Image: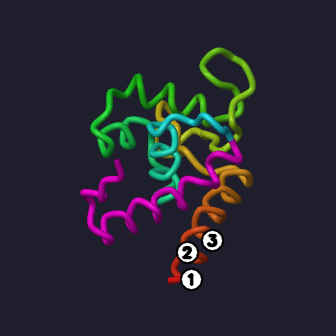
Amino acid sequence: MVTRSTLNEEVREAQRILLTALEPFKAVYSIMPLQQASTFLMVAEEEGLGVGEYARKAGANPAVMTRHMLDLGELNRRHEPGLGLVYTKPNPMNRRQHQVFLTPKGVALATAVYRALAGRKSKS
């Protein structure tokens, strides 16, 4: 039995756009959790904040955000190779705080997401 979709075309198109935007993440880590992808996008949107600030913006526990940042960094929380998408450096105004920035690999991923979306828009 074939049933019609309960979603209208605009909603289905939004789903296709989201899938297009997520495609570059699969090239970096095929099973990247959505929370890590969201964390990465937050850093890409506004680099240089502290982990606590990203946690507040996401409504997440700072310890959880720290784990996400570690997994996105050079060494993950298990001291194994991480994804290499972000790095931290001490805040020159507050040495107890570390600011988060994109690595060149992270910049490449953010650019790939943009290009995927730009290509999608040009096809519409």
Residue placed under numbered mark 3 in the picture: 115
Q: Which mark is residue 120?
A: 2
Q: Nearer the viewer, residue 90 or 101?
A: 101
Q: Amino acid at mark 3?
A: Arg
Query: Which kind of residue does numbered mark 2 sit on?
Result: Arg
From the viewer's perspective, is 3 left or right of 77?
left
Q: Residue at x 60, y 39 (%)?
A: 88
N-terminal of the two: label 1 or label 3?
3
Closer to the N terminus: mark 3 or mark 2?
Answer: 3
Give the magenta-colored segment's residue range. 1-28
Compute the Cα span from label 2 to label 1. Answer: 5 Å
Q: Is the residue under label 2 in contact with that under label 3 (CB below 8 Å)?
A: no
Q: What residue is at 69 percent from the left and 36 percent from the top? A: 83
Q: Quarter of the image holding residue 112?
A: bottom right
Asked if residue 78 lies left or right of residue 57, the reply is right
Q: Nearer the viewer, mark 3 or mark 2?
A: 2
